[in-house]
């Protein structure tokens, strides 16, 4: 039986203003709860979320409608052997030696954004950032870095960045469209059409004259005699552009919020860089940018004593599991000095926290994200040692599927 508890619907103004408050009640009183507004079962405790990621009946078929219309058949919705083979073609680019080769490019892009010279979203070039300036660090830094890194990896012209930002915003809105807004839906589909038209001749050109970029690498990649079709190269390119951008972008916003809303934290990490990794790991634990992963049950399953029928949409709520007081002491507090979290494994899919998901679909780009976040945060700490929140500014978070500060006004 599903327990009745008094919480606002997740998508109501009250629910979305503070979903963490909803999850706190659910973890305690109804760890498996049917939420009317999302028409899904919310699974909110750490142990149950981990079990869900591991359970073969928790399929990722939800991506057939949540993603396929804009991405094509991406890794997230494949399973079994097909998934393993395709993932083996993509993921080596983002770990070990594959990743090492991209690090100079990440550093170059961080510098380029801070020094100015990057294409502004509307028109013109971004101004260089100087100490003492008041800026919103989201449009001035966080939105640019992951997209520009991915575009550089794909070797796409920098002057097209504003176009890419537009496509990716519309595609992410499609994925986050829990409200089923028809305009958001059609705009996402149109973005796919435009991006595919843009990519098609580039993929053909790279097949004919391969370089060292990621599109050429994907086009030539071979695993057990199998290669990717043009359609698949376009799908993976689209997925990488989106999967790696929104999440890393939002993480920067949350890192700055955690460090600047209590400025002693900024000073502590500025003066002791061994805290950079714990700060990033705690940010992902307490405020994961992607807050929940959908799954569709292929058979009847019972979770925490609650039967869930086959065919149901469930959400593994990482934003709640990561704050489960059964797993972490003082779990809702951001604490880069805590001793019950192996920060060193936070980017390795160890299942301690779920910001990167877990199991076969666990994030393929976590190590790249780590590199961008570490290099980006260190550069900000070096250049703007006195950074603080702008006078009178209080960061507010928004979003239910994805969540992060709406603005981050600081004095550099
Ligand atoms: C802080 C940054 C990031 C976060 C929080 C994050 C989060 C996630 C999560 C939660 C999943 C699992 C989704 C599910 O199981 O339904 C995932 C999968 C994935 N991520 Fe990331 N991600 C980040 C950065 C990146 C980057 C930089 C890349 C680009 C290389 C990337 C590429 C992928 C891919 C390809 C998958 C699908 C893997 C599969 O289905 O086998 N991610 N990510």
Image (cartoon, helix red, strand yellow):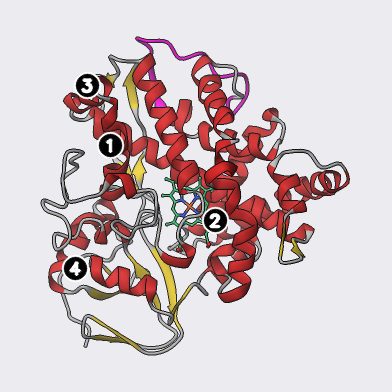
Q: Are marks 3 and 1 in contact (CB under 8 Å)?
A: no
The residue under label 4 is 26
- Is residue 376 shown to the viewer in this render? yes
Numbered circle sitting on residue 212: none
Query: In the image, which residues are magenta?
Result: 120-137
Q: Is residue 347 magenta?
A: no
Q: Nearer the viewer, residue 161 or 38?
A: 161
For residue 40, side relative to residue 248 (left or right): left
The residue under label 2 is 184
Q: Quadrant of the N terminus?
A: bottom left
Choose mark 4 or mark 3, whichever is in front.
3
Q: Is residue 129 magenta?
A: yes
Choose mark 3 or mark 2, whichever is in front.
3
| Pointer 4 residue Cβ closer than 8 Å to ligand 1 | no
- Expressed as whole percent of the image width and height from the top left, the position of residue 152 reads 64, 34
Q: Is residue 248 placed above or below 15 in the rendered structure? A: above
Of labels 3 and 1, earlier in sequence is: 3
| Residue 239 found in image quarter | bottom right
Whole-number angstrom distance, CA of label 3 to CA of label 2:
41 Å
Q: Secondary structure at mark 1?
A: helix
Whole-number angstrom distance, CA of label 4 to CA of label 3:
36 Å
- Expressed as whole percent of the image width and height from the top left, the position of residue 222 reads 73, 59
- Expressed as whole percent of the image width and height from the top left, the position of residue 403 reads 36, 49
Of labels 2 and 4, earlier in sequence is: 4
Q: Are marks 4 and 3 in contact (CB under 8 Å)?
A: no
Of labels 1 and 2, earlier in sequence is: 2
For residue 139, side relative to residue 383 (left or right): right
The residue under label 3 is 267
Q: Secondary structure at mark 3?
A: helix
- Identify the main secondary structure in magenta: loop
- Is residue 39 shown to the viewer in this render? no
């Amino acid at each position: 039986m599903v327990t009745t508890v008094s919480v606002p619907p997740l998508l109501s103004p009250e629910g979305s203003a503070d979903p963490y408050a909803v999850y706190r009640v659910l973890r305690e009183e109804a760890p498996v709860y049917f939420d009317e507004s999302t028409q899904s079962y919310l699974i909110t405790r750490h142990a149950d979320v981990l079990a869900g990621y591991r359970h073969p009946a928790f399929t990722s078929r939800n991506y057939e409608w949540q993603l396929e219309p804009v991405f094509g058949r991406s890794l997230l919705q494949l399973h079994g052997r097909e998934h393993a083979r395709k993932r083996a073609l993509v993921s080596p680019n983002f770990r070990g030696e594959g990743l090492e080769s991209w690090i100079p490019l990440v550093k170059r892009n961080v510098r380029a954004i801070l020094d100015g010279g990057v294409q502004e979203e509307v028109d013109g070039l971004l101004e260089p950032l100087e100490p003492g300036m008041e800026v919103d660090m989201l449009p001035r830094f966080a939105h640019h870095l992951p997209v520009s890194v991915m575009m550089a990896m794909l070797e796409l012209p920098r002057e097209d960045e504003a176009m890419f930002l537009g496509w990716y915003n519309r595609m992410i809105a499609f994925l986050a469209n829990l409200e089923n807004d028809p305009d958001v839906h059609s705009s996402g589909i149109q973005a796919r059409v435009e991006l595919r038209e843009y990519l098609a001749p580039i993929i053909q050109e790279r097949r004919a004259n391969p370089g060292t970029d990621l599109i050429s690498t994907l086009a030539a990649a071979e695993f057990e005699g199998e290669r990717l079709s043009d359609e698949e190269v376009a799908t993976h390119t689209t997925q990488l552009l989106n999967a790696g951008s929104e999440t890393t972008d939002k993480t920067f916003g949350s890192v700055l919020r955690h460090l600047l809303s209590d400025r002693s934290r900024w000073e502590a990490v500025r003066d002791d860089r061994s805290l950079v990794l714990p700060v990033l790991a705690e940010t992902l634990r307490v405020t994961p940018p992607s807050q929940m992963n959908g799954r569709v049950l292929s058979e009847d399953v019972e979770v925490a004593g609650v039967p869930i029928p086959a065919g149901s949409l469930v959400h593994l709520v990482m934003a709640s599991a990561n704050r489960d007081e059964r797993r972490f002491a003082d779990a809702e507090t951001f604490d880069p000095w805590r001793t019950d979290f192996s920060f060193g494994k936070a980017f390795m899919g160890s299942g301690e926290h779920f910001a990167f998901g877990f199991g076969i679909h666990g994030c393929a780009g976590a190590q790249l994200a780590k590199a961008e976040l570490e290099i980006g945060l260190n550069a900000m700490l070096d250049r703007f040692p006195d950074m603080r929140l702008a006078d009178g500014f209080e960061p507010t978070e928004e979003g239910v599927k994805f969540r992060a500060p709406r603005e981050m006004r600081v004095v550099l």
